[in-house]
Amino acid sequence: MNFKLRLHPKITLLLSIFVSSFVIAQPPKYSSTNKKAINWFEDAKNNYEYKKDEDAYKILKKVVEEDPQFFEAWMLLADVSEILKKSEESIDAFNKAIIIQPQRFPPIYYNLAGVQMQVDQYEAAITNLKKFLQFPKISPEMKKKGERRLGNAKFAIVALKNPVPFNPINMGEKINSIYNEYHPSLTVDEQTLIYTRMRPADGETDNGGSQVEEDFYLSIKDKDGWKQAISLAPPINTHGNEGAHCISPDGRYFFFTGCERKEGLGSCDLYVSERQGNRWSMPINLGAGVNSEKWDAQPTISADGQTLVFVSSRAGGKGQADLWMSKKTPNGQWQIPVNMGDSLNTEFDENGPFLHPDGKTLYFTSSGHPGMGGKDIFYSKKKADGNWSKPINLGYPINTKADEIHMVVSADGKKGYFSSDRTEGLGKRDLYYFDLYEVAQPQPVTFLRGKVRDKKTAAFIEAAFEIIDLSTGETRALSRSDKQSGEFLLSLPAGSNYALNVSAPGYLFYSENYKLGKSLKPTDVFEVDIQLNPIETGQSIVLKNIFFETGSFGLKNESQVELNKLVEFLTKNPTLVIEIGGHTDNVGNDQANMLLSENRAKSVVDFLVAKGIVITRLQAKGYGETIPKGDNTTEKGREENRRTEFRIVKK
């Protein structure tokens, strides 16, 4: 039979015991002199190396009964018992070995502590880890591992006493199957879910002799819940492995990991595909600007599409796998990635990043920061200076002594989605969601969704969308409407005042304002159909993001975002002559309102001239309260009447 030798991480340690006191050419010298026990032990070791653990376990039980002082037999029995999930027997075997020779093999205390942590014996684990760290000749690498495990044990004691709320709910048979489902991603409106499923290969495969392949599956939510998931069609899914992905918050771009591809630069590379109608474009390798000759995987993209966070094993990192970040340049190229630094990365592994659409909260998995013992999920907040805060463990029972791999959070911050192999699942790993407790929630984000059309023909338009925070001038979201359907989807973080600008060649740009409080209301979801006016003489638009001091013609700083857009528009259309029209409500004296509106129009013209627009292309006119658009008997109507418009006088 064609057996494969076990490459278990502890086998090297065990072999070091067997050969530490003799020359390689000599036969092994064990602590036992009982020939029957030694022969049985050799047989058990043979079974162990060929992964016949049950047989090895049965033989080792006979060995230690024959010679209870056989140190090496107790050590191997401890290891085999752990593999067979017989934790209590493993702990007992380790302790028996320690009693026989307490100083011979220092890592025995480290290994024993690991098994004790699996059964929540954290106090005992701490005692053994402290003993391990007191040995003077342990290697620097093992010392780091011991200190990490000690930190985990101390953290776990506190976490178990202070559990966080957690109510995982299986996403059901329309999402999950008898196979492994993992790595979910969501659009900002929480209506589109894409995830990875590992299933048997269906005939042809690009994975050599592998009998399984990873593919992407998609489900759409309607009023009745999630629809039956379907496989993403080619060219996204292939006969190879696709996985570790993200969908941009607007649903237009799909970033994913492709491995062992002909055009790849390393073992795994990052790719992107764009949705066009109901189809995805041919994936494009992100190139040498992002990818390296090493392993690059697990991307997450910011809401504005300008920041890519991913995992890489490239040189220059803190550990084997680190979090890296690349920014997009104005010409659309990705910059050389930079390591995200010591606050996030450790000497161990960081994986599974998810950058929330708020742009300020990062969730990721780490085996280096203090946790429950395996890989835990953490979150970090972006500080005012652009650096990331010290990561915070999500706590128990979200994190356990098993590995928690990847989590995404809904736009409103209230739900977490993750994968788990819980016993109540439908298959192996299933997708679940749960209510995320308040402290760990990101800044809530809502969305603006709709279509954009030509006002005259009603034809769909591919237009550029931009959401800008008026208080900071920061671009918070960038997107384009689908040229086939006109559809668009934009994220709007709570707690700020935003300018929306929509533009397309041959059209006047569209302007709107959205002001959101720190906490979102159910009504803070925006569905709009945008109609763009062609650039024609007589066409006009309201500039929704030009603001003046009350009763004054002094422009507020927040107005510069919109005014700069107008400068850009006039620069791109150098033959246009426009009129800036000022309008007021009916509060106050008619003559005073007329003068105020004239001065406000002149303030806008003065700004444009200062930015290089020739004065002969500009006209300023005040209309006062003579052309109301809203009802002056209501505050909302009066606000609508206090406006600045621009109209095309000459094309």
Image (cartoon, rainbow, N blue to C red):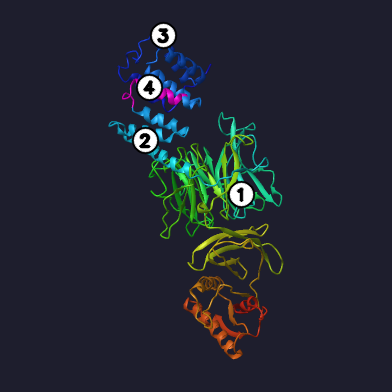
Residue 6 visible from this viewpoint: no
Give the labeled residue for mark 2. Answer: 146
The overriding secondary structure of the stretch rendered in magenta is helix
Q: Residue at x 36, y 35 (%)?
A: 146
Q: Position of residue 62 (x, y in %)?
A: 46, 13
Between disc 4 and disc 1, the foreground one is 4
Q: Work out whether residue 571 or residue 349 is closer to the camera in this orientation and state it.
A: 349
**Pointer 4: residues within 10 angstroms few (<14), some, or many (20+)?**
many
Q: Is residue 417 above or below residue 70?
A: below
Q: Which circle's residue, 2 or 3, is located before the other in the chain?
A: 3
Between disc 2 and disc 1, the foreground one is 2
**Pointer 2: residues within 10 angstroms few (<14), some, or many (20+)?**
many
Q: Position of residue 436 (x, y in %)?
A: 55, 50
CB contact under 8 Å: marks 2 and 1 = no
Amino acid type, mark 1? Ser
Give the labeled residue for mark 4. Answer: 97
CB contact under 8 Å: marks 2 and 3 = no
Give the labeled residue for mark 1. Answer: 281
Amino acid type, mark 2? Gly
Q: Is residue 374 above or below residue 626?
A: above
Q: Which circle's residue, 4 or 3, is located before the other in the chain?
A: 3
Q: Secondary structure at mark 3?
A: helix
Query: In the image, which disc is placed on residue 36?
Result: 3
Range covered by the magenta-colored residues: 89-105
Q: Position of residue 376 (x, y in %)?
A: 48, 42
CB contact under 8 Å: marks 4 and 3 = no
Marks 4/3: CA–CA distance: 19 Å
Amino acid type, mark 3? Lys
